[in-house]
Image: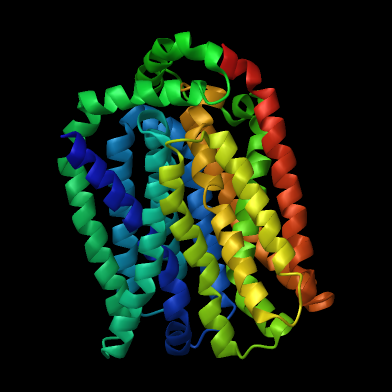
Amino acid sequence: MFGLLITIIYVSFISLGLPDSLLGAAWPVMRVEFSAPLSYAGIISMIISGGTITSSLLSDRLTKKFGTGLVTAISVAMTAAALFCFSVSTQLWMLFVFAVPYGLGAGGVDASLNNYVALHLKSRHMSWLHCMWGVGAAVSPYIMSYALTGGSGWQQGYLIVAIIQIVLSVFIFVSLPLWKKKPLAIASEAVEVAEENKTDEEPSARESTGEIADNIEKSETKSKPLSFKQILKTSGAAPCFICFFCYCALEQTAMLWSSSYMVYHNGLSVETAAGFASLFFIGITSGRAVNGFLTFKFGDKTLIRAGQCIILCGAAFIFIPDVPVITYIGFTLLGLGCAPVYPSIIHMTPTLFGADKSQAMIGVQMASAYLGSCFAPPLYGLMANHISQAVLPYYLLVLLAMMVVMHELTVKKTAKNVMT
């Protein structure tokens, strides 16, 4: 039973990544069909992000009322329905409308599953699950390419992914008893997770492991949802959210603008730069696969700090002009450095803030992540237009410095929570 539930969770993370690359891959064709400006893809993306932020902020209330399994099942079904509606859309306004449930579903899955894994599974699973998200995001452009080259149009690409999501939703609905029963293996892992995180840097806190296990059960059944005001008043919450914002701002900016930077900085052709831009994505996906094994020896805080050091090295490398190989290495290092940060921050959230607050905290973390992803890349675009594209490494370093300061401030402000 444990193996079946873990498999469903892993497949769910792959499915979470599947829709993320579809719009970018299909928009050059879609905009011609709808006679839409190139910039309208940004509007659709903003609407989707608005939906994800909304459902992330509501995740604490929804999960405590309905449970992780049901919230995940309904969210996946909502995303599947939205993707299907995209596939049958004949007017541009329909895409704007269906982008709302698209985003709501994605945010619900993201926040609920991340909290479930942080509470019940070890850190290695968090890293590998986010690696699976990368697999999904990498596969979806090929699905769209298959649909386009086969002459079926972008509609079939969306339809294929919608069918995958529908099938997954059915499996999650069927598996709901597993989520409620909490198999013994998962309960055992939950206790080990608490001990693993508690003993990362504070060996004296081992005696509270049993208490944390009780808090995990209480957090999912008895605790009341927190208001946004209560969340912000939690010690260490504000710097944690800013840290998340800065991380995702850095990640998305590097991912979006790496190709343009290489054209400007190294004089590469557009075609060549587009190919090497995938190095960042390869770095972050492979890094999370490796990071899962590193968690056997190192704790979350150590891995976050190591990742930040590697990001610093990557940013330093992309400063160097006229040597394309150095720039390639730089973007690869940026991806590798980003790899442990996101999953490790989420995984240690129950330890830093308490199991009873973890869903609320992770919900706002997700919202902060989407805000960073949404606004930071366009801000750099404005700077590139009015100043120079050469400001990219400076921009990334500012975000990194803020992330480091906010992470250390979070650790400091939550130290008492970890020790009690």
Any part of residue 363 in sight: no
Residue 113 vs 46, above or below: the answer is above
**Which picture quadrant has residue 238?**
top right
Query: Which residue is rendered at x = 35% and y = 28% of the image?
Result: 65
- Residue 325, given in percent of the width and then of the height, sits at 63, 77
Of 359 and 45, the residue lying toward us: 359
Q: Is residue 120 left or right of residue 225?
A: left
Q: Quadrant of the C terminus?
A: top right
Picture residue at 44% right of the left edge, 59% below the top: 286
Query: What colour scheme was applied to this rendering of the protein?
Result: rainbow
Q: Position of residue 175 (x, y in %)?
A: 17, 39
Task: Residue at 66%, 80% (x, y): give it.
Answer: 324
Q: Report if residue 272 is visible in the image.
A: yes
Q: Is residue 218 above or below residue 166?
A: above
In the rendered structure, the answer to whether residue 32 lies left or right of residue 172 reads: right
Quadrant where the N terminus lies? top left
Quick check: 45 left or right of 236?
left
Q: Is residue 32 above or below residue 292?
A: below
Quarter-of-image position of residue 156: bottom left
Q: How many discs mark residues in the rendered view?
A: 0
- Judge by depth and name the residue closer to the eye, 5 or 300: 300
Outermost residue to the front: 297
Q: Residue furthest right?
A: 387
Q: Residue at point 44% right, 72% down?
A: 23
Query: Residue 99: x, y in percent?
Result: 44, 63
Q: Position of residue 191 (x, y in %)?
A: 36, 20
